[in-house]
Amino acid sequence: GGVTAYQTDWGVVGAKITVTPKSQAGSPDVASPASPSSSQFSVTIPMASLEGRLPSVQGRIWGGALPIINSLVTLPDGGTDDSNGAVTSAEPQSTSIVTVVARDLQNVALYDSSGSFLGIR
């Protein structure tokens, strides 16, 4: 008297990525709205099926986008937090997009906003 279940189909609805911001002067930084001063944070990127939408690609494939904040501008009503110098009221001055493309969760590729390949996991 047991129940046997079979999974016949699956999809990717999101990818959780751990981000480590660059801290070198002049390098783009990735800032987390929840904790802009922490050294690492996780972000979940919603993924959408691209199957049948890319003429040169066959099979199952998903895509998502990760906005990257290149610099922040402090707003007049904000300032900085006295305890650790973290910006408490800021808005993006410059952003770019990293595109995430996955065939499955074992093969995930990253591309910059110009379409140049950044890496694979």
Image (spheres, helix red, strand yellow):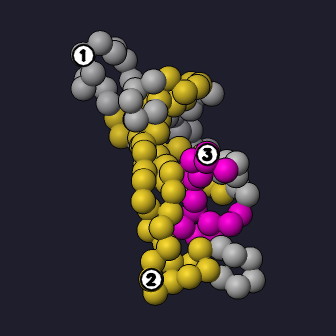
Please tell me whether mark 3 sits on a helix, a strand or a loop: loop
Type of amino acid at the residue the image marks with label 3: Ser
Rendered location of residue 8, percent (x, y): 44, 30
Residue drawn at point x = 57 percent, y = 59 percent: 31
Query: Vertically, is 33 above or below 23?
Result: below
14 and 84: which is toward the camera:
84
At x 50%, y 23%, the residue is: 117
- Residues 47 and 1: in front is 47
> Which residue is rendered at x = 36% and y = 40% of the image?
48
In the figure, is residue 84 to the left or right of 53?
A: right
Q: Label 3: how many residues lie within 10 Å, few (<14), some (14-19) or many (20+)?
A: few
Relative to 42, residue 107 above or below: above
Q: Amino acid at mark 2?
A: Pro
Marks 3 and 2, how far apart in space? 24 Å
Question: Can you give x and y, in whole percent of width and height, for residue 1 in the image?
Answer: 62, 45
Tell me, yes or no, whether the highlighted magenta stretch contains residue 26: yes
Measured in 3D between alpha carbons, the distance from the residue under mark 1 to the one under mark 2, in whole angstroms, is: 48 Å
Badge number at residue 76 = 2
**Extent of the magenta region:** 25-38
Q: Residue at x 63, y 27 (%)?
A: 121
First in sequence: mark 1 or mark 2?
A: 1
Q: Which of the two marks, 1 or 2, is nearer to us in this view? A: 2
Return the mark for residue 55. 1
Residue wearing tag 3: 27
Q: Is residue 88 above or below residue 105?
A: below
* Residue type, label 1: Pro
